[in-house]
Image (tube, rainbow, N blue to C red):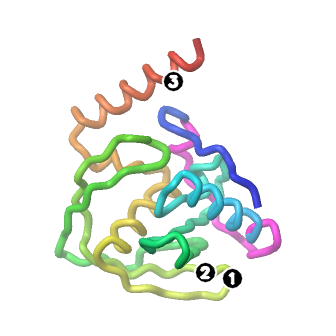
Amino acid sequence: MAVRDIIKLPDKRLRLVSEPVKHVDAGVKKLIDDMFETMYKAPGIGLAAIQIGVTKRVVTMDLSKKEDNHEPLVFINPEIVWKSDETAKYEEGCLSIPDYYEEVERPAAVKVKYLDRDGKPAEIEAKGLLATCLQHEIDHINGVLFIDHLSKLKRDRVIKKFAKAAKKVEA
């Protein structure tokens, strides 16, 4: 396992649409292990492979509160097959947009079909934080960021702030 670098806004790779995983093999399982190690170190509760520069439809998640009781979740090729009409607002953040948080309104519940770590088809109905996190990470593999759900003014401010910070780092 290895901790990988998390790419950050304004990196254009965050806008790429990730490719489906054709076979869950040793390479995909190593990617998943690296993603968990990276996510836990960050620390974060969700990570899409694209956030470490890998254009595969792989998401790792762990919403557990205690470090010693990890509850790792893996979603390969996740796809939302149903969304509730009811919505919920959560304050979201993102490892690729560090130290920026904003309230986002999304469907309160979703049903997602996916492959598990062993490549077996599975389905999950989620509400609350799990539903929000699934939608956030599935957005990532589709090249969408949580700031895309904000007003144009807020989104433009954030993009400008991170572009300016990136230029300072390059200088």
Does 116 sit above or below residue 5?
Answer: below
| Tag 3: amino acid | Ala
Quadrant where the C terminus lies? top right
Circle number at residue 119: 1
Q: Position of residue 64 (x, y in %)?
A: 45, 74
**Residue pictured at 63% horizontal, 49% vertical:** 52
Which corner quadrant holds the N terminus?
bottom right
Magenta stretch?
12-28
Amino acid type at image mark 2: Leu
Q: Is residue 72 magenta?
A: no
Q: Report, in whole angstroms, how far the alpha carbon at label 3 lies from the one at label 1.
A: 38 Å
Q: Secondary structure at mark 2?
A: strand
Q: Picture coordinates of residue 111 (x, y %)?
A: 38, 82
Q: Which residue is mark 2?
A: 115
Circle 3/circle 1 CB separation < 8 Å? no
Measure how far apart labels 2 and 3 are at the Cα level: 36 Å
**At 59% from the left edge and 45% from the top edge, which residue is drawn?**
6
Looking at the image, is 125 positioned above or below residue 56? Answer: below
Circles 1, 2 touching at the beta carbon (< 8 Å): yes
Q: Badge 3 local density, few (<14 within 10 Å), some, or many (20+)? A: some
How far is disc 1 from disc 2 in space, using C-alphas? 5 Å
Of badges 2 and 3, nearer the viewer stands 3
Instruction: Quickly name the residue at label 3.
Output: 166
The residue lying at 33 percent from left, 32 percent from top is 158
* In front of the other: 146 or 93: 93
**Which kind of residue does numbered mark 1 sit on?**
Gly
